[in-house]
Image (cartoon, rainbow, N blue to C red):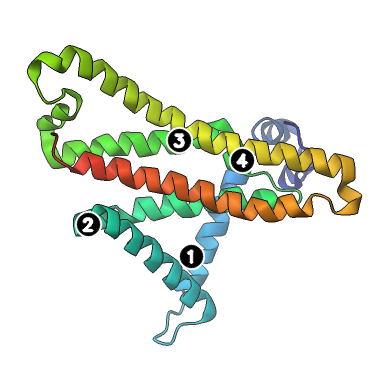
């Protein structure tokens, strides 16, 4: 989908040359950088000059981080607390990436399959890193089934299931965000002057949160499953 106006892409047009071509070809990369810079800046501002009596921004971040951590620990147990940095990063990055698509002139990176596939690969690969960390070579038992004679059946099914996790995580998020972008583009084209897209934009906040939460929850479940002993 070609956007009629993307603010940061237009900025790169001023530079011209290969940089402008890159910005037009890969807007999701440009806006991923925007999200990264935004999150790093907000994190710096929230942590700068932390006080015993928190400021509004510090208080907001503390509540958000504590809420994510408590929810995660309820599922994984105390043993999974060390996973908090990657799980929180996944949720916050995807939520903000979804959300900036509601700003005129901005493109949500998660409306590109490249971005969602990258996030899904990180989650699935790290799932196996966790499994090897906790079980060593015995992690292979997760793929072999309860009895030896079922291995030829269970092993291919497990492999297909883990590949399906990548497809499920990436296509679900991509499909929902791209669909929302298409609806907004159509409504703006047909009735933008009459504020018709506003209800869809309001619904977009809910969609952005739900899709980030689903990705976040599935990631936790995959990590937890890798920590558990094979049955």
* Distance between the alpha carbons at the discs numbered 1 and 4: 25 Å
Nearer to us in this view, 150 or 112: 150
* Distance between the alpha carbons at the discs numbered 2 and 1: 27 Å
Q: Is residue 59 above or below residue 164?
A: below
Q: Name the residue that disc number 4 marks.
A: 177
* Residue with the most extreme right position: 193
Disc marking residue 169: 3
* Distance between the alpha carbons at the discs numbered 4 and 3: 13 Å
* Distance between the alpha carbons at the discs numbered 4 and 2: 32 Å
* Distance between the alpha carbons at the discs numbered 1 and 3: 27 Å
- Label 3 Cα neighbours within 10 Å, binned few <14 / some 14-19 / many ≥20: many
Q: Secondary structure at mark 3?
A: helix
Whether residue 52 sits left or right of residue 38 in the image: it is left
The answer to whether marks 1 and 4 mark residues whose Cβ atoms lie closer than 8 Å is no
Disc marking residue 77: 2
The numbered mark, 1 or 3, whose residue comes first in the sequence reads 1
- Residue drawn 24% across the image and 37% down it: 129
The numbered mark, 3 or 2, whose residue comes first in the sequence reads 2
Count the marks: how many? 4
Q: Secondary structure at mark 4?
A: helix
Residue 217 at x, y percent in the picture: 39, 48
The numbered mark, 4 or 3, whose residue comes first in the sequence reads 3
The answer to whether marks 1 and 3 mark residues whose Cβ atoms lie closer than 8 Å is no
- Residue drawn 36% across the image and 50% down it: 86
- Label 2 Cα neighbours within 10 Å, binned few <14 / some 14-19 / many ≥20: few
The numbered mark, 4 or 2, whose residue comes first in the sequence reads 2
Nearer to us in this view, 110 or 28: 110
Disc marking residue 43: 1
Whether residue 183 sits left or right of residue 79 in the image: it is right
Residue 79 at x, y percent in the picture: 19, 55
Q: Is residue 163 above or below residue 127?
A: above
Quadrant in which the C terminus appears: top left
């Amino acid at each position: 989908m070609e956007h009629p106006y993307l603010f940061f892409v237009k900025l790169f047009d001023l530079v011209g040359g290969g940089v402008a071509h890159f910005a037009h070809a890969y807007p999701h990369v440009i806006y991923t950088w925007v999200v990264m810079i935004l999150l790093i800046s907000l994190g710096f501002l929230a942590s700068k000059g932390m006080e015993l009596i928190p400021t509004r921004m510090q208080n907001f971040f503390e509540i958000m981080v504590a809420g994510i951590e408590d929810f995660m620990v309820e599922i994984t147990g105390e043993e999974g607390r060390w996973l908090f940095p990657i799980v929180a990063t996944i949720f916050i990055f995807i939520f903000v990436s979804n959300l900036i698509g509601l700003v005129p002139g901005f493109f949500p990176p998660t409306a590109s399959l490249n971005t969602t596939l990258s996030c899904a690969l990180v989650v699935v690969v790290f799932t196996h890193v966790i499994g090897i960390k906790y079980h060593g070579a015995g992690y292979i038992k997760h793929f072999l089934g309860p009895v030896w004679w079922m291995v030829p059946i269970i092993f291919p099914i497990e492999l297909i299931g883990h590949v399906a996790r990548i497809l499920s995580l990436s296509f679900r998020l991509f499909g929902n965000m791209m669909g929302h972008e298409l609806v907004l583009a159509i409504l703006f084209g047909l009735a933008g002057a009459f504020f018709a897209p506003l209800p869809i934009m309001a619904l977009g906040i809910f969609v952005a949160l739900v899709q980030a939460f689903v990705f976040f929850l599935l990631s936790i479940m995959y990590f937890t499953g890798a920590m558990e002993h094979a049955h």
